[in-house]
Amino acid sequence: MGKKVKKEVTPPPKNVFDPLTIESRKTGTVILMLKSDEEEVLQKACEAVYRFADKCDENKLLLLEMGALEAIANLINHEDKIVKRYAVMAYGVTAGNADVRQQLRKTNSIEAAVQLLGDEDDVCNEFASLFLAHMSNEYNSKLTIYKHGGMEPLINLMESPDPDIQKNSLQAVCNLVQDFQIRGSVRELGGIPTLLDLLKSEYAIIQELSLNTLTAITQDGETRTVLRENEGLAQLVDFLNHKEYEDLHVNVLNVLANCLEDHESLDEFRNSGGMEKLLAFTTESATPEVQIHAANAMARAAKNVENAKILHEQEVEKTLIAMCTSDNERLKIAVCQAICILSENLAARDAFGKLEGIPPLIQLMQSESGDVKEAATLALANLTVNHKNNCLEIIAQNGVEQLIALLTFQKEAVVVNAITCLINMSHDEQLRTDIQKRGIISALAEPLKSDSVRILREACTAIACYVTGSESRAELRKNEALEYLVQHLRSTDAQLQRNASFAILCSCVDTPTAAAVSNLGALEVLQDINASEKRRNNYSTAALDKLLDSNLPAKYSLTGKLSSQNVVTDGFYDAGLIRPDGKILPLEELAKEPVNQRRPIIVVNSKIPEPIKSANGENADKRLGNKGASNKRMKKKDKEAAAKEEAERLRAEKLEEKMELESNKEIDEEQAYRPPVDTALQGYFSDVKNFIAPMATMREQIVALAQYVVDKMGGEVERAKLMDFSWELPIAEMKFELGSNIIPIGRIRKGTFYHRALLFKVLADSIVIPCSLELGQYNRAWNEVMVSSEEKGSNYPPFKYIVDLMHDPGRLIKSDSPDAVRYRSL
């Protein structure tokens, strides 16, 4: 046998550590391993970090606190593929925590991740895109990704055959395009065809992200054009036909809502039959959420005038009316909002009325939901704009009663919409009269008390619309509406103040209402408003004029002017000019003042008062010695005495005034003040009616009336002797004699300019001679009349003349002549 040879084993070098397998459950130990130079150690450490971070958010935070992310960041570009892969995986997973992302934003991690996109290793692509998907949740990170060119590689990765890469890159893009500055880059980089192809993915999350991305980017008009060119609308409609995608139909409708805003898109959609399919799909759908978004899509499309016409041609009204009967409140609201927008088109308003769309809306007003009431009333308000048939349908369906009932509803928008609808219905006289009979005026008193400025604005406008007759104005006076209207004049809100002025303007067309408003202080408030350039408006100016036209004593005191349209009747009094900020006192207040040295108040009153009832029901006239019968005897006696002797008539008048004053003292102080009866003025009216009114021409009437007035007021006065014409003393004596500052115009026997001008106006108005009355300074006043030329065949318009009542009675002075200037001044 041969001899065996023993093989020698070479011992390892003395300076080399023997191979060692390390197992550790300490996080700190693993993090230290990340700094190793050995690839095998790094591989195991990176893998361990990835698995540790993937477990929970607490582990991600722990890695952040222990400094693991800095070490990982240094390894994502390692030469060893395994080390690089696990490092990127750990990087992508840890970015799922918000606190981690906050720290990562302070580093160049985003730039490094962008550089990894398109790597030959799909795992690196998957987790690098995952990292960017996480980071793109913050606004600042979006801009950083975009600035470092992250959009293009992300869009390219959406075409990857790996679904995880598709999902992560698509998620990143979807997050990025929420910033409007980035949306256009998807179109520019050719990403739209890819997004449309991803709709065919077998993964629902990819389909959803693709639709969400399309929803964001189609808010841009150019992107919608590109989508249309790539037949995107047809693909979206086809997507709706797949019932298995039902949970994503809402997302599709969001994209369509954006696209159909363009007229070109809607027109193509209609021509391709897409609109019919969409309407059919909406009607047949059993999912309220889908129908809600379909209604929203129609509403958004209808904002374009041309689109609204197309939608009407497609009879979308039928679809919307059918959805009104749903039990879902959100769907009801969405349908009403769509009706609101569509009803801006007159043809659509017609269609809703003819297709019986009004009754369902009236039914919705009875809903317990305030939001549904708001939407329904807004839809009705829009449908009643300049549309009588729809208004008639509301009345026929008892909708007016429901609208009136909603005026006290607690939600502001509901009340505003209800009032707006009622305002729209008031524009037709027949409808307005019908609604007035249903108590609209009394109902509007309640919203006038609201704390909402919006409600108050509309309520004031509604008052202006419905106060059009004596009955409605009487009803307005019965409640507190007038008080609140005057209160709202003081509002700091310019629109409310304007609307309140409008309401007062429309209300004060009769004396009782004007008097009631004046007593509430409206005159003073309107004066204050019109004194301000900033606050004055057309309605406040017109309201003051209207109020003054119904309160001639106030108008004369404030402006010093009465036009030929202002007819002076019994009850008028001239208290003289007051300052613009002065308070206009009623005659009752002025009568309580003691006799003073100020200008007397001249009153016009030829009426014999009605018998006054005492507290126990007896006639006050009987209690006072049958004063009514005495008046008749006195009147007869006055006329007989006037025929005999002027002095006797004066004594009779004085006796009557004395009796009147005594009777006023005996009557209960609570009775309203009544000025003394002016029997002399009664005689003036009789003379003017019998002798001047029958004259052939107006010029003759004017001249004769002027001479008559001058004769009753002390005769003509030469200009040179005007200063010697003493009229003050007789007036002062009469005040003392009557014991009052109030003097009847007929009692004045020696009067100056302003006495004569007032008497001329009173008598001229009684026989329908149009003339004005204007009060100047220093007791000057004058009347202006329009008189035609007496020349035969003259085609000149009438001239305006001042009537001379002092120096040459009956002389007509052209108002623009130097003589007229002298007559008006000293």
Image: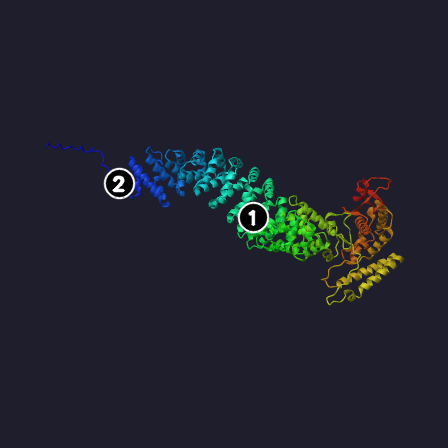
Tell which of 124 and 636 is nearer to you: 124
Tell me the element at label 1: helix
Where is mark 2, residue-wise?
22
Q: Amino acid at mark 2?
A: Ile
Marking on residue 335: 1
Q: Is residue 800 left or right of residue 581?
A: right
Residue at the far right: name it. Answer: 644
Counting residues from the start of the chain, the first of labels 2 and 1 encountered is 2
Q: Secondary structure at mark 2?
A: loop
Q: Is residue 282 left or right of residue 69?
A: right
Residue 607 in sight from this viewpoint: yes
Q: Residues within 10 Å of mark 2 (few under 14, many from 20)?
A: few
Nearer-the-camera pick, 669 or 65: 65
State how far apart marks 2 and 1 are (Cα): 69 Å
Q: How many marks?
A: 2
The residue type indicated by label 1 comes to Val
Above or below, comparing residue 805 to residue 160 in the picture: below
Which residue is found at the position 71% from the left and 50% from the top?
547
Asked where in the image residue 145 lies, by quadrant, the reply is top left
Q: Position of residue 678 (x, y in %)?
A: 81, 57
Across and down, in percent, residue 39 comes to 30, 35
Tell me whether the residue at label 2 lies in contact with that at label 1, contact meaning CB atoms closer than 8 angstroms.
no
Residue 794, percent across and down? 85, 39
Answer with left or right where residue 152 lies relative to residue 822. left
The residue closer to the viewer here, 20 or 334, is: 334
**Side of 441 where 173 appears, left or right:** left
Q: Quadrant of residue 674?
A: bottom right
Q: Nearer the viewer, mark 2 or mark 1?
A: 1
Q: Position of residue 144 (x, y in %)?
A: 44, 36
Q: Residues within 10 Å of mark 1 (few under 14, many from 20)?
A: many
Q: Which mark is residue 786?
A: none
Quadrant assignment for the C terminus? top right
